[in-house]
Amino acid sequence: MHVAYVCADPGVPVFGSKGCSVHVQEVVAALRRAGAAVHLFAARLDGEAPSSLRDVPVEPLPCAAAGDPAARERAALRANAALDTALSRQGPFDLVYERYSLWSYAGMEHARATGAAGLLEVNAPLVDEQQRHRALVDRAAAERVAARVLGAASALLAVSRPLAEWLEKDPAARGRVHVVPNAVDPARFPPGLRPSRPALLGVFTIGFLGSLKPWHGLEVLADAFARVRAVRPGSRLLVVGDGPARAGFEADLDARGLAGSVVMTGAVAPGRVPALLASMDAAVAPYPERPDFYFSPLKVYEYMAAGLAVVASRFGPMEETIRHGVSGLLCPPGDAAALADALLDLADLPKLRGALGREARRAVLAEHTWARVADVILDLARAARRAPGANAHDARLEARR
C-alpha cells in the first residue's frame, strides 16, 4: 500500500523528541514494518530522522514563520495549496493518513478527490486548545477548516474514548470515529536493559517522562516528592524531558530544599528513553483535576513496557489502561498526599513493585503495540477503498506503476 503520512502542524517536529514527535515516528515505522511504502509530508522536521526512518522519502511543507498570529493563520491556510500540489506530484496514493492540525484540510480533500482512503488521526480538540493555551485570531475560520477536514475523511482515529465521544457530537464526524490509543514498540524495551542513570544501592528512584507543561501536574509532583523525602530521605527524582514549565518546577523544588535530590536530563532523543526508564523504580503521571481529560499519555504506555510500577491520576483513559492494584496504582487527581502514600508503598514493598511492573509490561505488550495500531490503520484504509470510487483510483495507481 502506498501511504502519504501528512503532518502540517508546525508544533509537531516529526524528527524531534516530544511525545507527538515519537508518535509520528512510531506510526510511520509500524506502517513500514507492515509492508506499506510511506512518503512523509511535514511542515517541521527538527533534525535528522532516526536510523529506522532515514530512507523514508520526505516532502517539506510550508511552515509559517513566528510573528503576528493573524499572519501565521493566513499563511497556514495558504499552505493547503502546496500540500495538494505535493500530494499530486508524489502520488497517487492508496491512503492519505494525516495527523489533524488546526489549518490543514487539503490532505483529506485530496484523498476524497482521488479515491484514496483518507484517515484523520485526532489527538486533541485543537480549536479549543489553541484558544485556551496559545493565540487564535480567526476562530470561525478554524471551525470551518475543522468541518471540512472531518467531513472529507473516510474515517477518524481518536486516541482516547473521551476524544471519540467529543468527535461524535460533531455532525461532520458522526458514525466514522474509531478509538485507537497510543502504543509502544516492544523492540525498544527489551527485558534486562542496563540503566543509563543508575542510583546508588538502596536509593528509591521516582521517574517522570514528558514535556514539562502546566497540565502535567508538576506542582503535585513536587509536593508529593517532598512528602516522600520526609519519610525516605534517600529517595531520588529523575525527570526526563523539558518544556515551558521547567523553570517554575525547578524553582519549586529548590524552595523545598529538594534540588540536590533531583536529576533533570532535559530533552533527550527517543532512543535514549528506554535506558533512562530502566534507571527508575517507579514512574508517575500526576495529572491535575480537569473535566476534559482526553489524553492518551504515551509516557504511561512506555512506563508499562519498561516494566515499571506506575502511579497515575484516576481518569477515564487511565482507568482503561491501568488496573488499580494489578498493573499499577491510581490516585485521585491533584492529590499530592495520595500520590506520596502510593509511592511510599512501592518503596517499602519491592515485591508489590515487581508484580505491578510485570503485569503492566505483559498487558501493554499484549494490547497496545504500534504493530496493532498499523493493522487497524491498514484495515480501515482497505475498507475505505472498497467504497464507491476505489476502482478509478486503482486504475490511476496501476497507470503510475
Image (cartoon, helix red, strand yellow):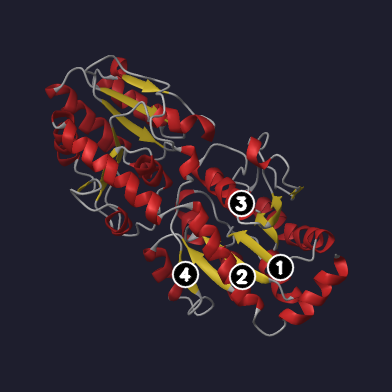
Is 140 placed left or right of 38 in the picture? left
Q: Residue, x 70% and y 39% (percent of image)?
A: 54
Which residue corresponds to mark 4? 178
User: Which residue lies most toward the right here?
Assistant: 399
Task: Residue 129: give x, y in percent of width and height.
Answer: 47, 55
Mark 3–mark 1 Cα distance, whole angstroms, equals 17 Å
Task: Residue 267: give x, y in percent of width and height.
Answer: 50, 30
Q: Closer to us: mark 3 or mark 2?
A: 3
Which residue corresponds to mark 3? 33
Q: Are marks 1 and 2 in contact (CB under 8 Å)?
A: yes
Q: Residue, x 62% and y 44% (percent of image)?
A: 14
Q: Quadrant of residue 377?
A: bottom right
Q: Amino acid at mark 3?
A: Arg
Decide: few, some or many residues near mark 1? Use Cα within 10 Å; few <14, some 14-19, many ≥20.
Answer: many
Q: Earlier in the sequence, mark 4 or mark 2?
A: 4
Mark 1–mark 2 Cα distance, whole angstroms, equals 8 Å
Residue 29 appears in the picture as rendered: yes
Q: Residue, x 35% and y 59% (percent of image)?
A: 292
Decide: few, some or many residues near mark 4? Use Cα within 10 Å; few <14, some 14-19, many ≥20.
Answer: some
Which residue corresponds to mark 2? 381
Mark 4–mark 2 Cα distance, whole angstroms, equals 13 Å
Decide: few, some or many residues near mark 3? Use Cα within 10 Å; few <14, some 14-19, many ≥20.
Answer: few
Q: Earlier in the sequence, mark 1 or mark 4?
A: 1
Q: Closer to us: mark 4 or mark 2?
A: 2
Q: Earlier in the sequence, mark 3 or mark 1?
A: 3
